[in-house]
Image (cartoon, rainbow, N blue to C red):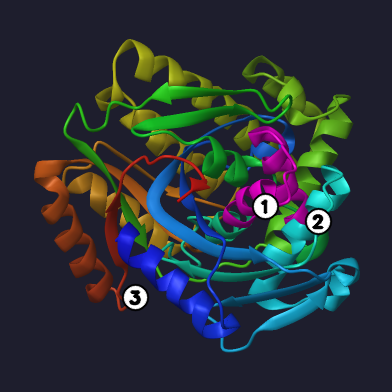
Amino acid sequence: MTDVLKQQVTEGFTAHFGYSPSGVWSAPGRVNLIGEHTDYNEGFVFPFAINRRTFAAVALRTDAVVRVASSFAQSVVELPLDQIRRDAVTGWSAYPLGVAWAMQQLGGATGTGFDCYIESDVPVGAGLSSSAAIECAVAVALNDLWEANLDRRTLARVGQLAENEIVGAPTGIMDQSASLLGELDHGVFLDCRDLSAQVIDLGFAREGLELLIIDTKVEHRHADGGYASRRAACELGAATMGVGSLRDLTVADLPRAKELLDELTYRRVRHVVTENDRVVETVRVLREQGPTAIGKLLYASHESMRDDFEISVDELDTAVETALQHGAIGARMTGGGFGGAAIALTPVAKISEVTLAVLAEFEALGYAKPDIFVVSAAPGAHAE
């Protein structure tokens, strides 16, 4: 698929702009194995880059104008570099334009305008971070073309700044870090406080396991109130407990939290504190016992998101429970919640059984037909 997309993005660039690009860069989407809503609480996350990628064909211009186009939108968006602001951009173009703005803000990078055409096979709206894949593909392209020499961690912050300030979504840095730091059959264990990252062997291929994505087709939107209210509850919990962030609390602090916090805020805090614990434990278990032993941790994460953080929906719960009943080792909803996808760590021999069972259950309950596919851990963003 990679070669096909590379050819399509080159042809798309030429068709839109009338000349050939300087090069093609790509970045993967990501799936979060475990660690949900911990990133903006300075906690731990454990995503990996997936073998679905976004490709950016780019060439510098001699003026200060940026033109961006893609296979998933009709029009070419054109804007001078110095006029990129949140109120001046809309839709998908906010991601590549935001990166150009953020590289100047954060990296001190200055360069001429550019033309950019984007093609992707990262599913949109499934919680696989199609947005970060766009940001990271454009970031590595501009890093090369503008000769900015920014390291991978800085490029991750560029993507986050673009999303926070230009797109207007209050997201953490996990997605960009996974897209930039990923390696084959490895996960990225990320400390969101100091942004230190360790690349951890997953061993899925070795153990005959694959990660099944069950995209429920229930659309979720982060910029709306659900995400913001969860974040506000976490900030209230930390302030009431007298800590800078929920990262500073451990499971041993929960009895005191229960005394001090209202019931809703306490459950939000309990999710984050126990989820941090589960991420660290998952990495330990992978190292000591291998991937067949992490199933209970994945499901415990789902229960916590369903009951304490209250971000699951019926379709996600159905996907998780059905997958477990038909042979998955572990399963959980993944991503920000209120829709999107579930993941199921499944032996290769059970993939078809789990897939057919989930399809049948969704049909029986009158849900939209889910999109079900396998992903593997892939290399991070790079020049093609």
Which mark is on residue 145?
1
Quadrant hosting residue 270: top right
Identify the element where label 1 is drawn: helix
Q: From this view, report whether residue 251 is shown above or below residue 24.
A: above
Quadrant hosting residue 216: bottom left
Q: Nearer the viewer, mark 2 or mark 3?
A: 2
Main secondary structure along the magenta-highlighted residues: helix
Label 2 and label 3: CA atoms lie apart by: 49 Å
- Residue positioned most to the left: 349
Residue 36 in the image, given as x and y percentages of width and height: 57, 41
Identify the element where label 3 is drawn: loop
Q: Is residue 267 magenta?
A: no
Q: Is residue 57 left or right of residue 360?
A: right
Instruction: Give the residue at x 40% y 47%.
Output: 50
Q: From this view, report whether residue 299 is shown above or below residue 135.
A: above
Label 2 and label 1: CA atoms lie apart by: 8 Å
Label 1 with label 3: CB-CB less than 8 Å: no
Amino acid type assigned to the residue bearing label 3 in the image: Tyr
Label 2 with label 1: CB-CB less than 8 Å: yes
Q: Quadrant of the N terminus?
A: bottom left
Q: Which residue is mark 2?
A: 111
Amino acid type assigned to the residue bearing label 2 in the image: Gly
Residue 66 in the image, given as x and y percentages of width and height: 75, 72
Residue 218 in the image, given as x and y percentages of width and height: 46, 71
Label 2 with label 3: CB-CB less than 8 Å: no
Amino acid type assigned to the residue bearing label 1 in the image: Leu
Dot 2 or dot 1: first in sequence order is 2
Identify the element where label 2 is drawn: loop
Q: Report the front residue among 55 and 292.
A: 55
Identify the magenta region: 136-163
Q: Residues within 10 Å of mark 3 (few under 14, many from 20)?
A: some
Label 1 and label 3: CA atoms lie apart by: 46 Å
